Amino acid sequence: MSYTASVHAKAIDLTKLTYAMTTAAGSGHPTSGASLAHLTTVLMYDHMRHDPAEPAHPASDRLVLSEGHAVPVVYAACADLGVHAVFDGRVRAMTRDDAMTLRQFDSPVDGHPNPVEGFPFFDAATGSLGQGLSVAAGIALAARLDGGDRRVFCLIGDGESREGQVWEAVDFIADQRLAAVCPIFNCNAFAQSDAVAAQQTAEVTVAKLKAVGYEVADIDGHDPEQIKQALDAHAANQAGAGGPFAIVARTAKGWGAASQQGNGHHGTAVKADALDALSAEFDATAAQLGATWTEGDLTIKPITHTPPAPAEPQPMPTLSGALEQFGKADVLGKGKWATRRAYGVALRALGLANGNVVALDADVQGSTGAADFAQDDRLAGRFVECRIAEQNMVSVAAGMGAAGRVAFASTFAKFFTRAYDQVEMAINSGLNFKLVGSHAGVTLGADGPSQMGMPDVAWFRAFTKVRRKDGHPAMYVLNPADAFAAYKLVGVMAAHDGPCYMRTMRPDTDVLYDDKTPFTLGGHELLAEGGDLLICASGYMVHQAHRALDALEDAGVSATLVDLYCLPFDRDAIAELAINAGGNVLTLEDNYVGGIGAAVCEALAERGVGAKVVQKFVTTTPKSALKPDEVIADQGLTVDDIVNTASTMLQLAST
Amino acid sequence: MSYTASVHAKAIDLTKLTYAMTTAAGSGHPTSGASLAHLTTVLMYDHMRHDPAEPAHPASDRLVLSEGHAVPVVYAACADLGVHAVFDGRVRAMTRDDAMTLRQFDSPVDGHPNPVEGFPFFDAATGSLGQGLSVAAGIALAARLDGGDRRVFCLIGDGESREGQVWEAVDFIADQRLAAVCPIFNCNAFAQSDAVAAQQTAEVTVAKLKAVGYEVADIDGHDPEQIKQALDAHAANQAGAGGPFAIVARTAKGWGAASQQGNGHHGTAVKADALDALSAEFDATAAQLGATWTEGDLTIKPITHTPPAPAEPQPMPTLSGALEQFGKADVLGKGKWATRRAYGVALRALGLANGNVVALDADVQGSTGAADFAQDDRLAGRFVECRIAEQNMVSVAAGMGAAGRVAFASTFAKFFTRAYDQVEMAINSGLNFKLVGSHAGVTLGADGPSQMGMPDVAWFRAFTKVRRKDGHPAMYVLNPADAFAAYKLVGVMAAHDGPCYMRTMRPDTDVLYDDKTPFTLGGHELLAEGGDLLICASGYMVHQAHRALDALEDAGVSATLVDLYCLPFDRDAIAELAINAGGNVLTLEDNYVGGIGAAVCEALAERGVGAKVVQKFVTTTPKSALKPDEVIADQGLTVDDIVNTASTMLQLAST
């Protein structure tokens, strides 16, 4: 009884503070927070093993608030418990006064969970809905690799559970037997616009979970004893049977005050002059429930596990060395090899050299190259088959990054599009992860546009001019032209603590480089030097340009050729090359506009270099063709097209 | 018995042709096709009401092949039935020889379903998995509005059903009681890399569907009678109870030939010299099944319904007229109003003027403005509440577009990111749809970066230089600065038969224009003319620039100000303005790089205009702040920043 009384008392206290905070901010979601008041209390004050003084402890239990808008109630608990965060540039215990800075510009108490602003209690930014359970799964997967037993609690809104990714994660957790994850569905019956649909009721949610094989605790989310028992049952299941287990909590949006309940109370702060009356409502609820806080009724549980030190990375062999080691030394014999194949070898070599590396793929490991990693017995335990669910894969990779792993996730470049929201949230979270998109550009050919990555460079480039707090761009975009470049860039990506995206191609392409060629973040490679024209190319188009050099020479054009394999690149260096080439610049890429061509135009325009830039890129939706070069020709990207364009630019007789 | 024998005979025939086609192409997915041989036969030869001579008949039943890679078997049926398509520039019945042109560059028989290449049997491009059921739902929704009873069959792979969007669509169909949709899960037990997971078995799929309330026919997908009965039951349900109904078909990947079954046969064409042996296997299967084709056993059913003529659009009133009409004439009284609010009024006025218009929203209608449409009793029947599932919403909008509706879908600009893959597939399909993303840019303020649309302009811009077959760009990106612009652009979007994306903002912004100001696709608005500097701005930054004009004048800078509200824009006109301003250009946008700044740099560089362009855009991940202008200031986008930047550019003493 005393336990119950104390939980009620704390729930009331946190709810009141939640309302005060959101009223002070003038916005926020107090009713959502109120529906979580008891769950938050039991988790953070009693059940979770965590340390308010070390909120990012690598072995502590974690709370992922997937319904990020409900965050004020968690902040309220953090303030009350003195969870450490960064205020005014220093780490200290959060106070209740700090809570009142919710959403203020100079406060880490951001509008939604946001670790990069100085709130390490959260592993990842949430608020774009439906992503948290996948992040939780990633954290739990990493913990399993560490041999730890940390548990990961994930609070998911019922309206939010309409997002398909939630069910990708539900499948994934069952598939991987991640008993450490405790999904808690907060069924408060209302979304923003209306009551939730019949498909998102507690009853149907229970049935959906059971269909996948979950054991489900269907509880009153405002009953302290029921919450405690369900969480204890989850712990027992984790230690025992280990199957998937979830909690469906029936709650009230706007719990504690009848005036705040029903439809129409989403995301609305209460006016300051209404707080007193509301407070009286809460006091009446408290009295009715016999809510009384007794010190000692609830106790935060200690962290028991000590995580192992991260594995010390060893140097990777060269590509030639790795091929020798893997019995594949002959693959380069024809002088052509696909960058996606080089990625596979690199991933395997990296995995063997660095125990922190994990690999994820979405049912296309044979196509992306990730199978090389998956099928090495020494690495198979660190391979995660995510099946055909890219959103979940990316958020799992982000979660593994949050737990200190270096995660490489691969699928077709096209299919990463499915997970751009997840990629952006992982970037916003400040996490470390690597994405490798295969079959990029038009050279996939036969399968047609539904499998080709076309606007990907434009999208990822948008993040290359976003500066992170460590000074790095929020994203490096890599587009290697040959196997040596692709191989080496995998090691370069692993060595960088931040997001990278690498494109690989389906067809075999000529070997241009060797084991000694350096590739760096921000680098480019100079393949030819001439005085008439600067050609900047990436990926497959480097080969087209390379093949055009002789014909250009014949046509009287002396060209500089740059393999612009990285965004961002050294803009000063490219500007200088452009000036040295008489200000004539041709850019070549086999994706839609917005990639290297745009970046080169910007670099020259911002320096006032009076250059003329002709961009060649893909200008129609591609279609199938048996041979990649038919699609290349259809897009005007042949060697002849390059020579003709250059001749026209320089007003020479065209070949 | 004869029915059964005929279905088996046709299934064998189509399977053989499927193998022949993929062998000729050297790639493709024959085993997936074989698993669909009986379902395809019963649907296309007997059950569906369709007309091979008019494959896009607006009242015919539809087949959406969500697992697009299985398409060769559908092509085989189309070839055998003489379904009309475009070969060599003219519409004619497809032949079996045509089928053998699978994946060839000059053939409409594309690698995956692709209506834009001349194959109107398909409504939408599929192949990026998990999207078809949502498209089917959109077609069915449109049919319901037309008063038709057309049915929409959707074939979904079991591996594919790991995609969360499939379950968003399952929920949606139940929510909307779309009994016309018949989801058919093709449970052939294998994905690409391996057997499907335990979560994707037929048993679990049945349980998942039942959890949502579906009636499920669990059948042998190679048993003609069971298929027929299940489809008849679907028809009876549609005419009767009208609840959600699905078929789970247990099939064999590589049906008909034991040598093609089991793991490792995904996406692999058979070598030409192995076809004869394979054919013998099929013949043996046929003999064993007593497969014999008897003309007349199977009959394509006639199309019974005549769809109504599309409603004739009436002119929209002006914004002032609409506000008057809706009793809101006072909202402009303060001289400020949010573009998202103007969108709501415009959508409502448009809906009243044009009966073809439908509106969709994802549980944020009060925030996006779509509530104005939803809450008008005359329009409520054309409003679709898609709840928190953006992927499904976009594909439903695409499906409604395929069925002749003009669909406007709205949510936060940020949340459309969740559906970029769906947007791209809808673009690739050549469909007509409009997306309106609210709370774009940083001026959302308090809610923080998880709710802000930041790289959206860069991504959508990638499509603005993709030329459709009708000559239009594949996407127009609109970023109106004030209420009049936003209002008028809604009408402009509706009048264009193609994809558009409009951004709206959260805060109220100054009124800059009036009812007479023209806004067009490709247009821009000149707000000031000066000789020293060209400022190109969009959205919120138009106001910042506008406010800076006086201070610029004081600082001795005579500036031209262009509201660059559309991508693409008239590049010649902008280049001329730049030249007239001495080649000094400042671009202003409150999103990440890759938007108007990049486009202006390109326009000048491609013309060799020796301009100097300073771009100002968002350069860090934004954070929460109580006031939008705090975030604007943090990003260096204040009026003072503009004046200082301009002064530095022109080497004047900075203010």
Image: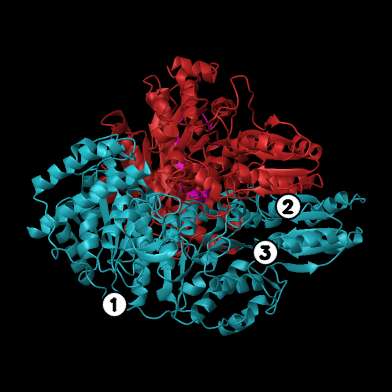
Chain colours: A red, B cyan
Left or right of B225? Residue B261 is: right
Q: Secondary structure at mark 1?
A: loop
Q: Say if mark 1 contacts mark 3, CB within 8 Å.
A: no
Amino acid type shown at disc 1: His
Q: Chain of mark 1?
A: B
Q: In the image, is residue B548 part of the stretch drawn in magenta?
A: no
Q: Give the Cα separation between the discs numbered 1 and 2.
A: 54 Å
Amino acid type shown at disc 2: Glu
Q: Chain of mark 3?
A: B
Residue under pointer 2: B606
Q: Secondary structure at mark 3?
A: loop
Depth check, front residue: A413 or A95: A413
Question: Which of labels 1 and 3 is toward the front?
Answer: 1
Q: Residues within 10 Å of mark 1 (few under 14, many from 20)?
A: some
Left or right of A581? Residue B110 is: left
The location of residue A353, given as percent across then percent down, is 50, 18
Q: Give the Cα separation between the discs numbered 1 and 3.
A: 43 Å
Q: Say if mark 1 contacts mark 2, CB within 8 Å.
A: no
- Image quadrant in which you'd find residue A486: top right
The location of residue A282, given as percent across then percent down, is 46, 56
Magenta residues (range): A54-77
Amino acid type shown at disc 3: Tyr
Q: Chain of mark 2?
A: B
Disc count in the image? 3
Q: Give the Cα separation between the discs numbered 2 and 3.
A: 21 Å
The location of residue B62, given as percent across then percent down, is 31, 64
Q: Residue at x 14, y 63 (%)?
A: B295
Q: Are marks 1 and 3 on the same chain?
A: yes
Query: Does label 1 or label 3 sit earlier along the sequence?
Result: 1
Residue under pointer 1: B305
Question: Which of labels 2 and 3 is toward the front?
Answer: 2
